[in-house]
Image: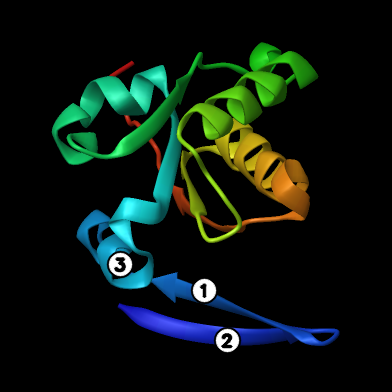
Amino acid sequence: MIKESFSFSSKNTSCYFEADFKNLEQLSDPARTIFITDENVFQHHQQKFAGKKVIVLRAGEEHKVQATADNIIQQLISFGADRNFTIAGIGGGVITDLAGYAASVYMRGLNFGFCAYLIVGNG
């Protein structure tokens, strides 16, 4: 895993490259991490999410709406998430947009990170 750090204003951001899903446990306390993914990624990798707090969203750009963000916030409340939790968005652009938005507005901001994921099909 390769770590690169960047400074924006007075804040630092770290990016990790060539990492594996298992590296997430080194970066965030598993008991205080909530994963947000879509139904396609979840279907392909259910075993990796086993025993974790997971919010599974419907796939597709048409679901990138406020009602979906409201649903995420309701699920964060049901998980008992507080300011010490981390949101991990696992997926493509819709998931990273929604996870980042929810993390920024819930309790005035939670730590968050993203893992880009691409499903490659045969046609």
Callout 3 secondary element: loop
Q: Around disc 1, counting alpha carbons within 10 Å, would you say few (fewer than 14), some (14 to 19), or many (20 or more)?
A: few
Callout 2 secondary element: strand
Task: Give the residue displayed 57% in from the left and 32% down from the top.
Answer: 77
Marks 2 and 1 sit apart, C-alpha to C-alpha, by: 6 Å
Indicate which disc, 2 or 1, sits on the residue closer to the N terminus: 2
* Mark 1, residue position: 15
**How many numbered marks does the figure carry?**
3
* Mark 2, residue position: 5
Quadrant where the C terminus is found in the figure: top left
Q: Is label 2 in contact with label 1 (beta carbons under 8 Å)?
A: yes
Q: Is label 1 in contact with label 3 (beta carbons under 8 Å)?
A: no
Residue 45, horizontal then vertical, whole percent: 21, 32
- Judging depth in this view, the residue of 94 and 26 nearest the camera is 26
Q: In this view, does 39 lie to the left or right of 121?
A: right
Q: Around disc 2, counting alpha carbons within 10 Å, would you say few (fewer than 14), some (14 to 19), or many (20 or more)?
A: few
Q: Which amino acid does label 1 sit on?
A: Cys
Task: Give the residue displayed 30% in from the left and 67% down from the top.
Answer: 19
**Can residue 103 be seen by looking at this rendering?**
yes
Q: Where, by quadrant of the figure, is residue 117 drawn?
A: top left
Q: Answer above or below: position of 26 versus 120.
A: below
- Judging depth in this view, the residue of 17 and 106 nearest the camera is 106
* Mark 3, residue position: 19
Q: Answer above or below: position of 41 versus 57.
A: below
Q: Which amino acid does label 3 sit on?
A: Ala
